[in-house]
Amino acid sequence: MDFTYFQKINNTYQSNSKQETDLFLLNRHVNQRFAGSIDYQQVLKNDDPFELLIIRDANNTFKKKIKSRPGQKVNLGDIITWGKQKWIVTSLDPDDKTYNSMNMWLCTIMLSFQNSKGEIIDRWCFDENLTKYSSGVVGNSTIRLGDYQYGIQMNLDEETKHLKRDMRFVIDEDGIESPDVYKITNREVKTSNYDYFGRGKIIHLTLSYHAFNKEKDKLIKLPNGESRWICDYIDPTTLPLPSVPDANESSILSEIQYKSSTLKIGKPREFIAKFSDDNDNILDDLIPKWTFVCGFDQELLTYDIYDNVIKLNVLDNSLIGESFILRLDSENGLVTQSEIRINIDSYY
């Protein structure tokens, strides 16, 4: 005997409307038959076991449509491990009353970089060749250089949100003595941002071809025995220890304001210290403390400090292509440190 009718009329499903009851029954039906689908796969979502329906795209083998069980969400930027492949979720349908429907793309590039603590960070990403949208060359009537570009999509997290324009990465095959290097020429974080309703976010980067620097770009061996090329590598042992704020003090935030993070030879540029409390109230009574972290002689940097401003300049052409970290603290050491990476380039 089918008891569904009696369950409905006695509100066994604890619903407030017929629509809620029907939705409950539909989701129960989906869950009961989910694993029986020919598209059913057991995968890893951010390294945790997960179940998905993976549906092939007839027009693109690098793209898959995926569905998860009702109530089991997948967010933008999640990494799906399927077999030996890494896929990143780049779009989703916010309507998740039944199935959760998303699209994922095959990751073919792993970007490796160094964070402010000197740690090596790896992130899988989906890439698109953007060179086909340009002329393939850039320059003036005298000099013409190859213009090679990648469009990158990756999860926007606590590490990748600090990626800025002019940061450089190696993108090449393993074992290459002088690998190809690309730098960030554009950065966009709002196009694919569903974080305001709890469904993740994606960072879009444009990477353009740049020169390899054998002095700054290092092949680093990791504790697990693997190796990574890291551009503008700074030995973590040279990084000063961060100050530990007093737990009894209120949180004071620091920020370095600037027009560009590129310092051109012979052209001074100002960087402004801003201090504020948790409520974004500006604090004018703190004295900035500026420090440099660089892999070259610090005396080659010239600077003037007045009020809350430091004016930096470089006159030595041998520093073209170098970079360093400008760090902001306060004389009392009771603020959250901030820092930026500054790249040195020619005037022209």
Image (cartoon, helix red, strand yellow):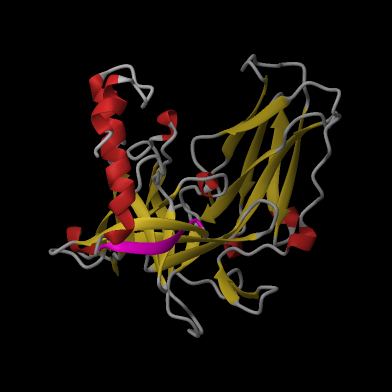
* Image location (x, y in percent) of residue 94: 30, 35
Residue 181: x %, y % from top left: 44, 69
The quadrant in which the C terminus is found is bottom left
State which quadrant residue 255 falls in: top right
For the question of whether residue 223 can be seen, the reply is: yes
Quadrant in the picture for the N terminus: top left
Q: Residue at x 67, y 59 (%)?
A: 119
Describe residue 231's horizontal placement relative to residue 250 as left or right: left
Q: Is residue 111 above or below residue 155?
A: below
Q: Is residue 140 visible?
A: no
Name the residue rendered at 58%, 49% in the picture: 342
Residue 114 rendering spot, x and y as whole percentages: 61, 59
Position of residue 127 in the picture relative to residue 296 (left or right)? left
Q: Nearer the viewer, residue 274 or 300?
A: 274
119 above or below 68? below
* Residue 141 falls inside the magenta stretch: no
Front-most of 58 and 152?
58
Task: Examine the image and state in which quarter residue 162 appears.
Answer: top right
Q: Is residue 40 magenta?
A: yes
Q: Quadrant of residue 13?
A: top left
Q: Measured along the vertical axis of the image, is residue 98 above or below residue 15? A: below
Q: Main secondary structure of the magenta part?
A: strand
Expressed as whole percent of the image width and height from the top left, the position of residue 113 reads: 56, 61
The segment highlighted magenta reads 39-46
Rendered position, 32 above or below 248: below
Q: 76 or 331, which is in the foreground?
A: 76
**How many marks do you count on the picture?**
0
Most foreground residue, 342 or 16: 16
> Which residue appears farthest toward the left when viewing the image?
59
Q: Is residue 259 left or right of residue 294?
A: left
